[in-house]
Amino acid sequence: MSKDKFKKVEHTRMAEAVVEQVEEMILHGTLRDGERLPSERDLADRLDVSRQTLREALKALEEKGLVESRQGGGTFIANIVGSAISEPLVELFSRHEEAYLDYMEFRLLLEAKAAGLAAERATPFDRQIIRARFDAMAAAHDQDDAARDAELDADFHFSIAEATHNPMMIFSLRSIFELIRRGVFYNRYVVYLEAGGRDRLLDQHREICEAIEAGDVPGAEAAMAAHLTFIIDFFSGALKMRQRFETARLRAEAQGFKL
């Protein structure tokens, strides 16, 4: 963990100041779910507070549900975002293909705006991260590893969410991208994206990346909207085709025909 993450606090309201700093770091994604905090001695030194003050702050954070202590393992940021996606909901989505269209429609509404905000607000560091995430996708493009593709896809999109510097946007989209990471939908739409579909996806991600790098707000919004609309249209068309095939098959069987 980088020592630059933490800064010394003033010698007034010490415990409250530590709590506020950690809360802000969680809000802005500097500290993430499951991340282990430095040792008590190290963290107290970085913050320039006594270990007793630090213990008071960590106790307050634990009471708020923001950190959790593990016996013999240290203190960790609590799994705040993960709890937003219940297991029954994940299973429900995975069993019903129509739910994918609802999921993508929601992403379209949020992510087009997120891309525009990223183009407007991204720092040089944000742009480096987004470019690195895209480059990783491009490097893995020919490996045909759906699980790896899902992880890289989520990483790329989430780096854009982080570049909005809007905590509500970041946390909302982190929950959404968790479904990608878990493969609830990803394998399904990859199956449908044949005949150059994956190549088109990579080109679309490149256009999004380049628009954000250029600070092109309308271009970034348009590129993200086009990308997600492409997936929605492709999946919707494939789903309708399969439904027609199934209807025709049942009709044919009723008339004594079989393939």
Image (cartoon, rainbow, N blue to C red):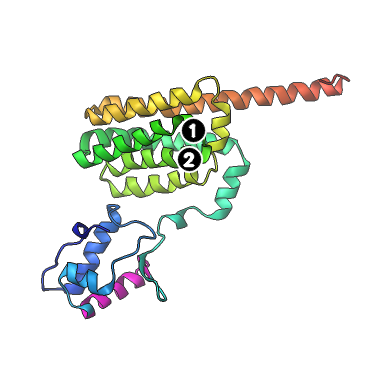
Quarter holding residue 113: top left
Mark 1 to mark 2 CA distance (whole Å):
9 Å
Q: What segment is highlighted magenta in the picture? A: 52-68
Q: x and y percent of residue 253 in the render? A: 84, 23
Which circle's residue, 1 or 2, is located before the other in the chain?
Answer: 1
Say left or right for 164 vs 150: left
Decide if residue 175 is on the left or right side of residue 183.
Answer: left
Q: Please identify the quarter of the rendering in which residue 79 is found.
A: bottom left
Q: Nearer the viewer, residue 214 or 242?
A: 214
Q: Main secondary structure of the magenta part?
A: helix
Residue 214 position, x and y percent, is 22, 27
Residue 155 location (% of width, % of height): 38, 42
Helix, strand or loop at label 2? It is: helix
Would residue 137 be counted in the magenta stretch? no
The residue tagged 1 is: 143
Question: Under tag 1, what secondary structure?
Answer: helix
Identity of the amino acid at label 2? Arg
Q: Is residue 56 magenta?
A: yes
Is 74 located above or below residue 170 in the figure?
below
Would you say residue 76 is visible in this rendering? Answer: yes
Report if residue 123 is visible in the image: no
Kindly identify which residue carries mark 2: 148
Q: Do labels 1 and 2 touch, CB within 8 Å?
A: yes
Q: Dot 2, crowdedness within 10 Å: few (<14), some or many (≥20)?
A: some
| Quarter of the rendering containing residue 169 | top left
Q: What amino acid does circle 1 point to?
A: Gln
Image: 143 above or below 199: below
Determine whether, in the image, residue 255 is placed left or right of residue 115: right
Write the residue at 61% across / 27% down. 239
Viewer-side label of 1, 2: 1
Is residue 34 depicted above or below 177 in this figure?
A: below
